[in-house]
Image (cartoon, rainbow, N blue to C red):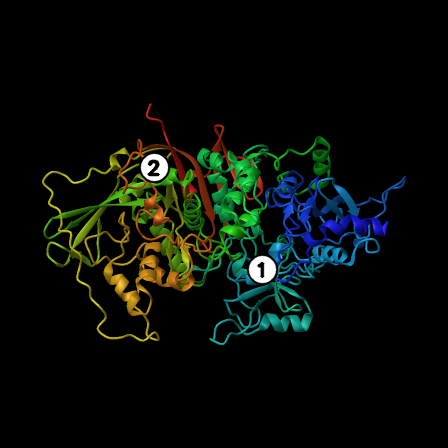
């Protein structure tokens, strides 16, 4: 038999490879679908490219490449034997689990067990060879099979390149002993039990001792009493008190000497009277508060509709997305995009064509991965209701598991995230990100990858007309630029409960001075009309250079719609920067309307009697002296796109997107090539600070059309927010050749989706989205998809409207 197998494999030996250093082995997920070794058909791994394919897609790869030998991986997940008499199945040994795959978290390790199976399959006849089969297989094949079986998953291999080290589950988490000593932790007023320090406090999860952390070289931190306590007691785990939120907590293991994960942290905190779901981190003004002691319903509860009996929905368009760890910003954006017909038609409607013409490595193809995710969300294949017997079994097991939503597993966006975040310092990390920035990032990528084909992001594009007036001469200049999103101000001074806010602030200051617990927070209620009014009001142009006077003067700018998009994105400017440069969120609600009419904001162009400013550029002013790189360069603030030195409005990108000559001069004086400086300024909306960062992260030889050449999508302080600067070359048949392609129409809209954020800043917290489908609002909270009972439309962050028909 050994000779027979050897002879059988001889024709294929040149195509069988042993994975080398740098090779990624995709043995956890199909390149075209979300099939895995746990799927019914298992996963086929090509023994030449090491790409993984589900049963439905492996034939395509064979026909396209001619690669015939695949390793078929199958993981069987079964409930553990109960030990009942009468032929109970004996417990399987761990030796049957030999694939280096993550255990499926949807199955409780105490109730289920795994058994792995591997075999070689030769196409097209599907001849199977069971593994391991050392005696009968040629040595090269045996070595290759062993290497594939023991190789880390493709994404584990990329993790060392991430900016953050992976945090492991503590070995003490599952078996942690907690003393029944009656300790209950108050919601505020914490201090170290040994030195009365009130900062950097840690709660020991065994005995409930509250003690300070270690001292740092800059004098901050603490006196190390938490570590001393561990040395005295050997109680291993502690949690940082001011970082506990419904999203998680910072846990440290003294014995393991590193930050760790505690999957049972909610139960461990509950032992000391802390309801993790009610916690919200607050570090402002040094106060640490816990909403669990207050009657006020927290933002987390309102947005997630906690406490309501939400009905789970299944099927096409109702598939959840697994959270990879702070990836909810991606999940919410992709759920909304694939609820839009244009994106469905582009990627899912053209699925077979995209898959058939995909490159040899489809994991690196944008269209393929978008089609894969879109099909996963819309097909209903990964959102099937449980069988009746499964429901009965689940109900019998649950008892008190209120938060187990009887939910689907959801699909993992890991492959798409790895692709679209490649080369981006923020999105490639495992930190929480701003959903608005990621949305613009995705629009940018869709633009880049739609050259010569239908571009679904056209639906968001519109023209902004900006009218700038010299206050001294009264002369004007009109410019137009492309944009994708309205950034709507939230004027706190217009709050309808202003007196209540002032009273709260007085009580808060009094509590701070007397080191008492702060009062119950008051949330500002701002009318939507006030936000729209603030958006339309003229704004001063700082450092304005008047071409009529050929000198600096006072100038004002107003912005209007030169065209209305088919789909309108509206972002509430809830975030500001604190003195520590950390984005902080304003605590407010806005009654955003279901129907919106912006017709009165349509631009009118130059009016009769208006005199235009001369078309002159300001003089170029070079630095008086040569500055050394060690000296700080005076650049605009991150919160300010920078003052304009010409008649053009602040931060605006004209349709030709020509950067100011003085900005180019500053960069070239620092030694950067002129062409590269112009490219950097164009990619960053002429923002000097961001252009400098762009230059350092985009080497000169890098081509513009590569995916890793990511344009910065950081929002600016304009009322409109540019997503990309190269889109002006995309033309419309109904516009002149030099104009951008827009889908103009009436300015009347209806709300169909919104993304909400919970937490103190964009750097932390959690995102969920609500989408209106089939006349019903649906909440998408990671993998959980339910009908919404009370959609919190007044607490959203990004709103999406579709245009109403003109009839």
Residue 682 as seen in the image, left or right of residue 385: left
Decide which of tag 2 and tag 1 comes sooner along the chain.
1
Q: Secondary structure at mark 2?
A: loop
Distance between the alpha carbons at the discs numbered 2 and 1: 40 Å
| Residue 174 location (% of width, % of height) | 70, 57
Q: Give the quarter of the figure containing the C terminus.
A: top left
Q: Residue at x 37, y 45 (%)?
A: 572
**Front-lying residue, 746 or 183:** 746
Q: Give the labeled residue for mark 1.
A: 159
**Above/below status of 545 relative to 734:** below
| Residue 323 location (% of width, % of height) | 57, 48
| Residue 571 location (% of width, % of height) | 38, 45
Whether residue 79 is visible here, answered yes or no, is no
**Above/below status of 433 relative to 317:** below
Where residue 408 sits, quadrant-wise, is top right
Q: Are marks 2 and 1 in contact (CB under 8 Å)?
A: no
| Residue 664 location (% of width, % of height) | 27, 62
Q: Residue at x 12, y 58 (%)?
A: 550
Residue that lies at the very extreme toward the top in this rendered image: 807
Residue 565, numbered label: 2
Q: Residue at x 31, y 41 (%)?
A: 740
Q: Label 1 crowding class (10 Å Cα cut-off): few <14, some 14-19, many 20+? A: some
**Front-lying residue, 124 or 450:** 124
Q: Secondary structure at mark 1?
A: helix
């Amino acid at each position: 038999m050994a000779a027979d197998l050897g002879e059988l494999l001889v024709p294929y030996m040149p195509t069988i490879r042993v994975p080398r250093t740098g090779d990624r082995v995709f043995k956890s997920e199909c390149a075209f679908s979300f099939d895995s070794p746990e799927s019914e058909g298992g996963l086929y791994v090509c023994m030449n490219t090491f790409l993984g394919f589900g049963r439905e897609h492996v034939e395509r790869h064979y026909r396209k490449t001619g690669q015939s030998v695949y390793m078929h991986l199958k993981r069987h997940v079964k409930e553990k034997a109960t030990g009942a008499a009468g032929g109970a199945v004996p417990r399987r040994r761990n030796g049957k689990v030999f694939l280096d795959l993550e255990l499926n978290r949807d199955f409780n390790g105490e109730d289920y067990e795994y058994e792995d199976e591997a075999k070689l399959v030769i196409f097209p006849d599907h001849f199977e060879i069971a593994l391991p089969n050392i005696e009968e297989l040629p040595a090269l094949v045996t070595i290759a099979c062993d290497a594939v079986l023991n190789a880390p998953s493709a994404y584990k291999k990329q993790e060392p390149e991430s900016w953050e080290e992976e945090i492991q589950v503590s070995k003490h988490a599952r078996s942690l002993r907690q003393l029944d000593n009656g300790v209950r932790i108050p919601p505020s007023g914490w201090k170290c039990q040994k030195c009365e320090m009130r900062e950097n406090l840690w709660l020991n999860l065994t005995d409930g001792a509250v003690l300070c952390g270690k001292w740092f070289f800059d004098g901050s931190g603490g006196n190390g009493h938490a570590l001393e306590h561990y040395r005295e007691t050997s109680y291993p785990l502690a949690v940082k008190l001011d970082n506990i939120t419904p999203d998680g907590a910072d846990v440290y293991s003294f014995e393991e000497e590193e930050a760790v994960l505690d999957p049972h942290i909610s139960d461990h905190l509950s032992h000391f009277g802390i309801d993790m779901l009610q916690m919200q981190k607050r570090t402002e003004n040094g106060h640490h508060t816990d909403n669990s002691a207050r009657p006020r319903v927290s933002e987390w509860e309102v947005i997630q509709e906690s406490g309501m009996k939400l009905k789970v929905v299944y099927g096409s368009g109702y598939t959840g997305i697994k959270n990879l760890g702070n990836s909810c910003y991606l999940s919410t954006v992709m759920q909304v995009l694939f609820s839009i017909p244009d994106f469905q038609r582009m990627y899912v409607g053209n699925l077979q064509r995209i898959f058939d013409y995909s490159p040899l490595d489809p994991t690196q193809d944008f269209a393929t991965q978008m089609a894969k995710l879109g099909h996963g969300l819309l097909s209903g294949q990964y959102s099937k209701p449980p069988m009746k017997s499964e429901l009965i079994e689940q109900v019998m097991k649950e008892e008190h598991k209120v938060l187990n939503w009887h939910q689907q597993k959801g699909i993992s966006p890991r492959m798409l995230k790895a692709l679209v975040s490649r080369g981006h310092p923020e999105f490639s990390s495992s930190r929480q990100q701003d959903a608005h920035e990621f949305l613009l990032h995705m629009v940018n990528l869709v633009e880049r990858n739609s050259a010569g084909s239908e571009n679904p992001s056209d639906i968001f594009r519109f023209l902004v007309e900006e009218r700038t007036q010299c206050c001294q001469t009264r002369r004007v200049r009109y410019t137009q630029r492309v944009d994708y999103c309205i950034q709507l101000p939230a004027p706190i001074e217009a709050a309808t409960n202003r007196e209540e806010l002032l009273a709260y602030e007085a009580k808060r200051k009094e509590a701070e001075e007397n080191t008492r617990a702060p009062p119950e927070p008051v949330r500002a209620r701002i009318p939507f009309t006030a936000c729209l009014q603030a958006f339309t009001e003229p704004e001063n142009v700082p450092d304005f250079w008047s071409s009529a006077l050929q000198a600096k003067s006072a100038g004002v700018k107003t912005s209007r719609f030169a065209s209305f998009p088919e789909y309108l994105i509206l972002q509430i400017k809830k975030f500001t920067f604190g003195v520590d440069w950390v984005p902080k969120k304003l605590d407010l609600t806005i009654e955003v309307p279901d129907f919106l009419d912006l017709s009165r904001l349509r631009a009118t162009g130059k009016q009769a009697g208006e005199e235009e400013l001369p078309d002159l550029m300001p003089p170029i002013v070079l630095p008086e002296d040569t500055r050394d790189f060690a000296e700080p360069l005076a650049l605009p603030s991150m919160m300010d796109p920078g003052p304009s030195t010409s008649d053009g409005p602040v931060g605006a990108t004209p349709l030709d997107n020509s950067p100011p000559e003085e900005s180019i001069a500053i960069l070239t004086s620092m030694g950067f090539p002129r062409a590269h400086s112009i490219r950097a300024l164009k990619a960053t909306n002429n923002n000097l600070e961001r252009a400098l960062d762009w230059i350092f992260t985009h080497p000169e030889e890098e081509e513009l059309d590569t995916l890793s050449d990511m344009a910065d999508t950081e929002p600016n302080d304009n009322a409109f927010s540019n997503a990309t600067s190269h889109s002006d070359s995309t033309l419309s048949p109904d516009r002149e050749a030099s104009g951008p392609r827009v889908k103009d129409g009436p300015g009347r809209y209806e709300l169909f989706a919104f993304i909400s954020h919970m937490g103190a800043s964009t750097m932390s917290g959690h995102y969920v989205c609500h989408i209106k489908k089939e006349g019903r609002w649906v909440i998408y909270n990671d993998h959980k998809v339910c009908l919404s009972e009370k959609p919190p439309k007044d607490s959203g962050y990004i709103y999406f409207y579709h245009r109403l028909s003109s009839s």
